[in-house]
Image (tube, rainbow, N blue to C red):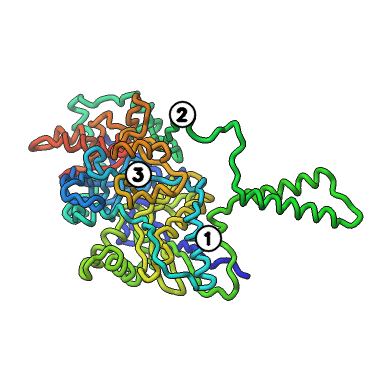
Amino acid sequence: MRKHTLIIFNLQRPARCVGSNPASGGSPARGRARTAEGGDLPPLRAGPRRPPGTMAAAAAVVEYKGWKEGYRCGYCGSERGKVSAGMWAHSMTVQDYQDLIDRGWRRSGKYVYKPIMNQTCCPQYTIRCQALHFQTSKSHKKVLKKMLKFISKGDVSKVVGGEEPMDSHIEDVVSCDFAYKSESHVSQSELTPLSVDHAERVENEDKETGETKEVDQQTVESGSLQICVDRDTPVPGEPSHSAKTVHAPPKPGKGADLSKPPCRKAKDIRKERKLQKLLQNQMRTLEGSQLQAGDQACLLQNSKSKANQPKTIEDFIFDTLPDDARHKLEVRVVRSSPPSSQFKATFQESYQVYKRYQMVIHKDPPDKPTINQFTRFLCDSPLEAENAPNGPECGYGSFHQQYWLDGKIIAVGVIDILPYCVSSVYLYYDPDYSFLSLGVYSALREIAFTRQLHEKAPDLCFYYMGFYIHSCPKMRYKGQYRPSDLLCPETYVWTPIEQCLPLLEHSKYCRFNQDVKAVDEGRIKELGRVRVLHKRTVMPYSVYKKRRKGPSDEASVHQYASLVGQTCSERMLLFRS
């Protein structure tokens, strides 16, 4: 017997120092940026604590594109029902993106967007699975057993299942072509901050006006990241405000009676009786010796625990295979941005799988799934590759998880590895293998992968599945991965999905946080502290506002800051021409 041939490779080129230029192979793209007040940009967290002496991540640079209203919805078919906000991300740290998705944002390529939940036709709620406590359902076990049977014997009945892959959220951007129209045309030179001396002159100019305001003590206490004040920097590795979970008290007469023992399945009871009978037979056949009472109790307890302990997801995935197994399955994790040598070597084969998938599964015409589209949405990423001593061995950033069957790619899961989660971006697979339910299987593998990464990176313990759309029945399958939480669209706290579903049955848009006094703790408090990149100089919006010529853009900047939150607005650089 040999162990199941499911191998995870961390195939990547060495991660560059954060803030370097990927095109130059790791050479610095620019000097350390300074703010208009003359202070260094703050160290940006890439999840766990960065050791002394290592370089801090470069600041993210984004272009806010505003709201897009009245475009086609890929879920309900409404021609003018979709409403979302978007921005083009030239670069972004993994901590920035983690904080953004914890406020309802998602990315497709370098385009980052957020549905306007109380206005869009099909509200899309960010959903995460608690990977460490994941419970395989009966249908999940069937998929895992089907894959094991196929690899072992190769005789699985080729009946296409009705499971959905983890890919639906990209439909928003691709269907309306909004991201193409919103693509940035700003040159790289305009995104590069000038020298320190120039920034200091801007600082002096601002000081001469005498209008510089003191930092609001309440903002400091709330944990928002402040520039040039060490005590305001949040403790690395500490979860953001959005990591809170709301648990509503149980209602009388609802749910299990905790004063009584839990119900047990008849199958488990039969197993226990069988084990007890075997134990009795073993005791009778002992020649001339008797077990002590303590030994009997210990043996009986071990038998009970084995009988009642359910199989973990790893028990299914890494089950033992016969030596003469018909197939060989490998899972390879390759960095897609910046592209590793392994990613480049398999690019064409991966693209051909994507093209067939789009044509057969999504009925795209032969000329639509172009290499350009594939690269923009599934290969390009604004996330900087980052490594940390107590982070995952493969590092943080964007990856392709390739499924190789007998030496050829049959499926690819596009994922982001972030400080607190593995985030699913898209899945495409060879339609010839639809009978293996690869959408469900890949999701289960990504949950197992999250659990594996957690062993090295303790903060990384969630699996983000994109958006849950209750108003679209075919999109409810994501709620089957339990336990899972939905993000409240108003206060940005996590709520167990069991508490959300009754609310969603009555209204497609819901505030899940039942505390009427609760507010968005990460809301914008000081618009003047929003960081701006203008004419290659980093400055707070309060300085930029005075220097700006022409009509005011305060409404647009306020809209941007309210959607990304105070912390991200002070950490990321908002490009202004």
* Residue indicated by mark 2: 251
* Residue for point 37% across, 58% down: 165
Circles 1 and 2: CB atoms closer than 8 Å: no
* Residue indicated by mark 1: 317
* Residue for point 16% across, 44% down: 69
Q: What amino acid type should be assigned to the residue bearing mark 1?
A: Ile
Q: Quadrant of residue 222?
A: top left
Q: Which mark is residue 126?
A: 3
Q: Is residue 81 left or right of residue 21?
A: left
Q: Residues within 10 Å of mark 2 (few under 14, many from 20)?
A: few
Under circle 2, the secondary element is: loop
- Against 308, residue 21 (above or below) is below
Image location of residue 395, percent across then percent down: 44, 54
- Against 474, residue 373 (above or below) is below
Front-lying residue, 117 or 192: 117
Circles 3 and 1: CB atoms closer than 8 Å: no
- Looking at the rendered image, the disc whose residue lies closer to the viewer, 1 or 2, is 2
| Residue projecting furthest to the left | 550
